[in-house]
Amino acid sequence: MEIERELLNAVDQALLAVMILIIMFGMGASLTPRDFKEALQRPRGMFIGFVSQFGFMPLIALGLALALKLPPPQAIALIMVGCLPGGTTSNMFTYFARGSVALSISMTAASTLLALVMMPLLLDLYASGFARQIDEALLAAGAETGFVIPHVNIVISLLLVLVPVGAGMILRAKSPGWAKAAEDTAGFMAIIVILFLVGSVTVRHTGLFLATPWQLYTACVGVGVAGFGFGYVFAGLCRTPPRQQRAISLETGIQNGPIAFAIILLSFEEPLRSQMLWLPILYSTFVVMTSSGITLWYRKIGRADDEIYRNNRVHRRLFGADYATRYPDAVVPRRLKRTETFGE
């Protein structure tokens, strides 16, 4: 699928940039230095999350790109989405799914920083073949310069995105009340960004949805759904508590679409920019739907273990941190008995 005209005009791009800044500011407002400290104190959960985020997701994206024979620009965009960490949206869905919000926030904080190193490495590892195809096509068409993945620009884009995150953390330290408002706004702003992008593209490119091949839809839906599944199963095999299992699953499958928009806008030129941008727009659209469905299911199956976890917290506050509550076997779900702890 070729996109000959710019997908977003200058006004759209300016509005999108403002909304991305608000989202990343709100994400920073949800973080504190303690979150990074707690991430280091949860090495097991963080390691499982790291393998899921930077191990499974890029491989899933590469596998889908090869299996569906995506054009090189869309293949690189899909791998880029697979390399990105989750944002505030994953924290919000984890809360509603009765998952470990503390682990989700810790994973978001750690993976956002790790992406500065991991994303260029993973793109070089998995996307270099697609980059060579674009380079050969450009040179064959008579272009004066070829194409290489702009690693430096991507790192600079990630650093620029982290600036509002840092500002949000400063606000959290100065005024927790305002920070909470910014955090809540960011979660809904992410949804607004997606609706804005889809609406803007629909108005000017009404035939684009119909012209989009089924392979691209399959890739955009499949990368998120496969991420949920791989994250959930891997965390379960590692005998993590169900609350952590749900958090890792959602953190793995929900990637940060706004960062993908920012990187593509700042790092690539037309016509590649528009060809690549369409994929994260579609991914962000469908991941909201799939995340909502999986969250409702997780919320249903997690009711019992979440109640046990909350009861344990109350008991430990009353009787001491070492107090162990005894429950009848019929009360404790089978999947909870296989884990080492009922806690976070």
Image (cartoon, helix red, strand yellow):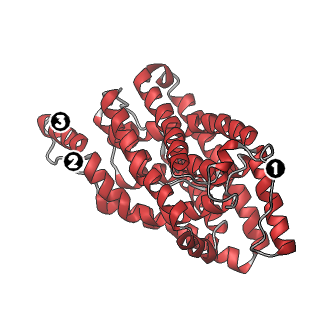
Residue under circle 3?
137
As displayed, is residue 205 above or below residue 55? above
Which one is earlier in the sequence, the residue at label 2 or at label 3?
Answer: 3
Residue under circle 2?
147
Give the number of the mark in front: 1 or 2: 1
The amino acid at mark 3 is Ala
**Cβ atoms under marks 3 and 1 closer than 8 Å:** no
How far apart marks 3 and 1 lie (CA) works out to 67 Å
Where disc 1 sits, the SS reads: loop
Binning the other alpha carbons within 10 Å of mark 3 as few (below 14), some (14 to 19) or many (20 upward) gives some
**Cβ atoms under marks 1 and 2 closer than 8 Å:** no
Residue 217 in the figure: left or right of residue 241: left
Where disc 2 sits, the SS reads: loop
The amino acid at mark 2 is Phe
As displayed, is residue 6 above or below residue 204? below
**Which label belongs to residue 328?**
1
As displayed, is residue 313 above or below residue 81? below
> Quadrant location of residue 181?
bottom right
Q: Nearer the viewer, residue 292 or 6?
A: 292
